[in-house]
């Protein structure tokens, strides 16, 4: 199984800052990676697919990058509505696997 | 508008069975792979099962293989998850999701609690 190591586990940043969340796969996943945002009490929402493609309706301050085994999610100009947990997920091979999540808070 | 509505969750004793349903609307159901993803309380996400468009291919992680069965009825635009031999560690909110380059659409989830 492909292991997804996500960091950091939690993150506190100020409004307007830029934050980056990292995800490392245990083997090459050929950019078959998605990022999700989950706000408290809600279902997850797709932000990024294919490592760097923005999902429909997602603000352009979210971006994804990476290749091979290393991937990142960047949030520019942090807004209060970005308070949430973020998860990466590989869909290169079954079983699909998720990162353990990053909880983002506002300072 | 794409909608996925799960039902069938509840409290069940260890070793018993439960069947979840997901009603899909707003898209051509038969064109998409579908999946179940679960989330234990205060925990992360775990993929549980995937089914191909026709239902001929199914995929499971080892944690549920042999106990859970995913199925679909394209005529009814419905997805199912039959869960047998339930364990306490199966306690989670179960989400139905449309699968294509990740999971683009999710339902609101249905809570399954396995406890005596």
Image (cartoon, rainbow, N blue to C red):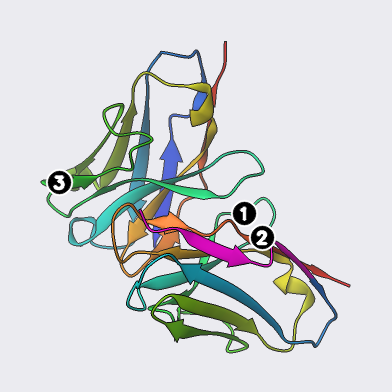
Q: Give the spatial CA distance, label 3 vs label 1.
A: 29 Å
Residue A18 shown left or right of residue A22 in the figure: right
Residue A4 is a magenta residue: yes
**Which region shows up in magenta?**
A1-11
Q: Chain of mark 3?
A: B
Identify which residue is drawn at 35% across, 53% down. A1
Q: Position of residue B60 (x, y in %)?
A: 29, 42
What residue sits right under mark 2 in the picture?
A39
Comparing B89 with B5, the one in front is B89
Instruction: Give the SS element for disc 3.
Output: loop
Q: Give the spatial CA distance, label 1 vs label 2.
A: 5 Å
- A42 above or below B49? below
Q: Position of residue B99 (x, y in %)?
A: 32, 60
Identify which residue is drawn at 33% across, 70% down. B101
What residue sits right under mark 3 in the picture?
B55
Identify which residue is drawn at 83% across, 82% down. A15
In which quadrant of the rendered view does residue A103 lie? bottom right
Q: Position of residue B9 (x, y in %)?
A: 48, 29
Labels 2 and 3 in the same subunit: no
Report if residue A52 is visible in the image: no
Q: Is mark 1 in CB contact (under 8 Å) with mark 2?
A: yes
Q: Chain of mark 2?
A: A
- B44 above or below A101? above
In which quadrant of the rendered view does residue A73 lie? bottom right
Identify which residue is drawn at 35% across, 73% down. A28
Q: Give the spatial CA distance, label 2 vs label 3.
A: 32 Å
What residue sits right under mark 1 in the picture?
A42
């Amino acid at each position: 199984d492909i292991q997804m190591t996500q960091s950091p586990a939690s993150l506190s940043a100020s409004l307007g800052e830029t934050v980056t969340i990292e995800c490392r796969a245990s083997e090459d996943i050929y950019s078959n990676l998605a990022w999700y945002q989950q706000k408290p009490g809600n279902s997850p929402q797709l932000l990024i697919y294919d490592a760097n493609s923005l999902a429909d309706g997602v603000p352009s301050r979210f971006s994804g990058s990476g290749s091979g085994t290393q991937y990142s999610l960047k949030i520019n100009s942090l807004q209060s509505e970005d308070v949430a947990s973020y998860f990466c997920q590989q869909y290169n091979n079954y079983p699909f696997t998720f990162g353990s999540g990053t909880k983002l808070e506002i300072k | 508008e794409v909608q996925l509505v799960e039902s069938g969750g509840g409290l069940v004793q260890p070793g018993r069975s439960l069947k979840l349903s997901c009603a899909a609307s707003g898209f051509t159901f038969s064109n998409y792979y579908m999946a179940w993803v679960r989330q234990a309380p205060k925990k992360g996400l775990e993929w549980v099962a995937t089914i191909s468009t026709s239902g001929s291919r199914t995929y499971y992680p080892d944690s549920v293989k042999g106990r859970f069965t995913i199925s679909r009825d394209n005529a009814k635009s419905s997805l199912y998850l039959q869960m047998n031999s339930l364990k306490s560690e199966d306690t989670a909110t179960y989400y139905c999701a449309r699968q294509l380059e990740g999971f683009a659409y999710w339902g609101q989830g249905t809570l399954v609690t396995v406890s005596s």
